[in-house]
Structures are given as structure tokens and as C-alpha cells.
């Protein structure tokens, strides 16, 4: 597409489409909002995120325990992700680079980024551990399911190759 056609489509004379610029501005605004959260806000949204993902893991384990189906259990896990989305909680791995865009646009500082990432990581883990502590204590019948699920993910590893080599007979 020629520069003249791009100018004709958009409101500005720039060769970059207006929608791209608007999208970037939206990402920067979201990142700036997240970077400018106070410590209490970072800690509360991070803890909520960990609790909500923990609830998703609990749903996963409940369905896996009752059905033995990893597919149904995976669908049940989405309960935690939906709760996370609806509550606007902070998850360390969610939109990880959005605050970087705000930092690049000089809408925040490296200190604010560190506060957001460290506070969110620590509180996500704390929330998840708290839910799992409650699950282990409240549902002793799930012990075998917990061990098998944990062992499965340890065997697969970060690259996802562990179970594939076992399945192929290697």
C-alpha cells in the first residue's frame, strides 16, 4: 500500500495507521496505570491474582480427581483465569511487557517496574501457596491426584519433552 493510500485511510498524514498509534497509546496508558500503583495496590492485586489462579488449580484438581480427564480438568482451570480477568487482578505472567511499553514511553521508572514485578511475583506465589495449603488440608482424598499431577509436570519439564519421549517409547 502506498503512503498516499495510507494517508487517505487515516486521519493523520503519517504513514503509520492511526489504529496502530491508538493501540500503542492504550498499551502505554495501561502500563502507566499499573506502574503507578501504590505498594498496597500492588500487593492486594498480586495476592488476589495468586488466589484466583489457585482456585483454578483447585477446580482442575477436583475435576481431575472425579473424572480422570485432563481435558475436562483443563477446562475447569479456566474458572481461575476468568476470575482473574473479571477482578482485574495482577498476574506476574499476564501482559508482562505492557509496563515495559510505559517505561519506554517515559511514563514510569525502573523502580516502579521492579516494584510491580517483585511485588506481584511474591504475592502471586503467596496466594497460590495459601490456596494449595487449604486444598491439601481440606481434601485429603485428593492426595494421590495432587502427587500424580505434580509428578506429571515435573516429568514434562519446561521444554515439554519429558512425556513425549516416554510416549514414543524412547
Image: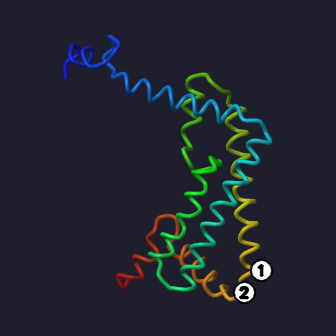
Comparing 105 with 28, the one in front is 28
Q: Residue 134 vs residue 76: left or right?
A: right
Binning the other alpha carbons within 10 Å of mark 2 as few (below 14), some (14 to 19) or many (20 upward) gives few
Comparing 79 with 162, the one in front is 79
User: Where is residue 50 drawn, in percent x and y?
Assistant: 68, 58
Q: Residue 150 vs residue 130: left or right?
A: left
Task: Work out how far the residue at label 2 is from the one at label 1, CA to CA, in angstroms.
Answer: 6 Å
- Identify the residue at horizontal 54%, vertical 39% (top origin): 97
Q: In this rendering, is residue 80 above or below 72? A: above
Say if mark 2 contacts mark 1, CB within 8 Å: yes
- Identify the residue at horizontal 62%, vertical 46% (top origin): 88
- Identify the residue at horizontal 59%, vertical 51% (top origin): 86
Q: In this rendering, is residue 4 above or below 52? A: above
The colour scheme of the drawn protein is rainbow
User: Where is residue 53 drawn, in percent x and y?
Assistant: 63, 61
User: Where is residue 104 drawn, in percent x and y?
Assistant: 56, 26
Q: Residue lying farthest top?
A: 13
Q: Quadrant of the C terminus?
A: bottom left
Q: Quadrant of residue 130?
A: bottom right
Q: In this rendering, is residue 137 above or below 78? A: below
Q: Secondary structure at mark 1?
A: helix
Q: Residue 13 vs residue 38: left or right?
A: left
Comparing 23 with 145, the one in front is 23
Q: Secondary structure at mark 2?
A: helix
- Identify the residue at horizontal 72%, vertical 32% (top origin): 111
- How many marks on residues? 2
Disc 1 target residue: 137
- Disc marking residue 140: 2
Amino acid at each position: 500500500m502506498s503512503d498516499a493510500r495510507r494517508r487517505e485511510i487515516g486521519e493523520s498524514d503519517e504513514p503509520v495507521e492511526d489504529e496502530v498509534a491508538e493501540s500503542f497509546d492504550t498499551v502505554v496508558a495501561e502500563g502507566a496505570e499499573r506502574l503507578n500503583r501504590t505498594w498496597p495496590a500492588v500487593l492486594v492485586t498480586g495476592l488476589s491474582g495468586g488466589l484466583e489462579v489457585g482456585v483454578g488449580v483447585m477446580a482442575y484438581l477436583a475435576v481431575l480427581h472425579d473424572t480422570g480427564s485432563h481435558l475436562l480438568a483443563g477446562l475447569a482451570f479456566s474458572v481461575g483465569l476468568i476470575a482473574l480477568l473479571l477482578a482485574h487482578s495482577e498476574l506476574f505472567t499476564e501482559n508482562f511487557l505492557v509496563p515495559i511499553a510505559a517505561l519506554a514511553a517515559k511514563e514510569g521508572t525502573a523502580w516502579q517496574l521492579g516494584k510491580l514485578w517483585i511485588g506481584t511475583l511474591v504475592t502471586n506465589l503467596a496466594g497460590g501457596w495459601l490456596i494449595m495449603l487449604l486444598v491439601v488440608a481440606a481434601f485429603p482424598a485428593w492426595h494421590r491426584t495432587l502427587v500424580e499431577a505434580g509428578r506429571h509436570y515435573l516429568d514434562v519439564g519446561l521444554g515439554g519433552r519429558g512425556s513425549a519421549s516416554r510416549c514414543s517409547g524412547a
